[in-house]
Amino acid sequence: MHASIDAYPVLVLPQVQHLNGEVAMSEGDQNAVSRREAVKLAGVGALATTAAGQAVAPRAAKAGPLKTKAIFFDVGGTMLDWTVMPAKIEAYLGERNISVDGGDYWPSWRSQLFAYMMYNTMIDRAFVPLEELATRATLAHAQKSGLDMDRDTAGGIYPLLGELDTYDEILPSLKRMRGAGYKLVPHTQLSEPVLRRALLGRFDWDWFFTSESFAMYKPNRPFYFKALDELGLDVAEVLYVSSNQFDVFAAKGLGFRVIWVDRWDQALEPYGYTPDWRVRDFAEAADMLETETP
C-alpha cells in the first residue's frame, strides 16, 4: 500500500509551520535511516528540521486540509493530571514512616527515572520493563537522598501513576476528535498495567502502544515507526500530541507534525525543534482539528 521511495512524492502541506534550513547528514546517519523510514519522512518533505529562528505557531492556529488519519497522544502529564503526584507520594511514604516533601521529591524522582530510561534506551538489547526500572530508579534516588527505603516500598511509587485522573477537558475533546473522523492512539512510555488502570477503560481507543509493545523507550526511532507500520500509516498521516517538550523534540526530529499542549505557559527550550501548533489544552486542539478533513 506504500509507494516505493523512488516514486514517493514530496508532499507540500498547506498552512503547516515547518522549519527552515538544510539538513546535512553524515554517511553513517544516512545508512541508519531505513528505506521504509525514508518513505515516511519524505511525506513531510524532509528527513529532519532545524529551528532556524522560527517562532512557535500562535495559540489555536487553524490548520488547512492536512489529510491526517490518526493522532498519537503522549499520556503522562499530557492526558493524566500529574499535579496531584507530590501529595500522593508524600502520603504513600508517610504511611511507611518516611518523611519527604512531595513537591521536592516528585520532580527529582522523575529526573532519576528519566535518566534510567535514557540509559536503557542507549543500551541495545537490554530492555528492562518500567515497573522494574522504576523500582531501581527509586532505590537509587533514595540512596542519594539519604532515605531508608526497602525494595517493596520503592516498588510502590511508580504504580501510583495508575491512580491519576485525566484533565477535565480530555474526554469531551477526544469525543470531538473521534466525531471528526480521526483514529486516536495513546503512544506512551508507561507500562500497560498502569495505562489500563489510568486511561484505557475511559475511552474507546483505536489502538495503543506502550514501552512494552516493542521493548523500548522513547525517543528510540523504532518505537515510533513500528507503531506506524502496525497501523499501516505514514508519518505524514499522523499528528503527535504532547505537553512534554521531550516528546515535542523527538517527534519533530522524526518528521511528525506536532501539537504542543502548553498548559503552563512554558518557555520553549532551545533544543532545535519547534512544534507546528501550540495550544492551551485539548479543547483548543479539538477546535483546530475540526477544521481538517481526515
Image: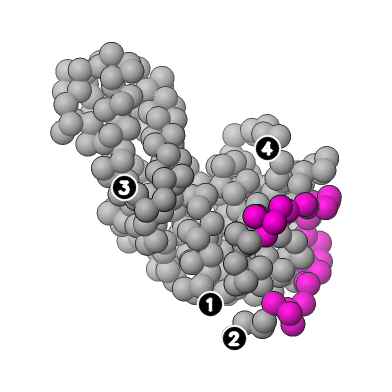
**Is 34 in the magenta?**
no
Q: Nearer the viewer, residue 12 or 66?
A: 12
Label 1, label 3: how far apart the Cα atoms are: 28 Å
Which mark is drawn over residue 271?
4
Callout 4: helix, strand or loop?
loop
Callout 3: helix, strand or loop?
loop
In primary-sequence order, the first of circles 4 and 1 is: 1
- State the scheme by which the image is colored: one colour
Callout 1: helix, strand or loop?
loop
Q: Mark 2–mark 4 contact, CB under 8 Å?
A: no
Which mark is drawn over residue 1?
2
Q: Is residue 50 visible?
A: yes
Label 3, label 4: how far apart the Cα atoms are: 28 Å
Q: Nearer the viewer, residue 158 or 224?
A: 224
* Residue drawn at (70%, 45%) of the image: 273
Q: State the image coordinates of residue 137 (x, y, percent, origin top left).
A: 32, 32
Q: Amino acid at mark 3?
A: Val
Q: Mark 3–mark 4 contact, CB under 8 Å?
A: no
Mark 1 or mark 3, whichever is nearer to me = 3
In primary-sequence order, the first of circles 2 and 4 is: 2
Quadrant of residue 151 within the rendered picture: top left
The residue beneath circle 3 is: 128
Mark 2 or mark 3, whichever is nearer to me = 3
Span highlighted in magenta in the image = 5-30
Q: Amino acid at mark 2?
A: Met
**Is 24 in the magenta?**
yes
Q: Amino acid at mark 1?
A: Gly
Q: Mark 1–mark 3 contact, CB under 8 Å?
A: no
The residue beneath circle 1 is: 232
* Residue drawn at (44%, 71%) of the image: 206
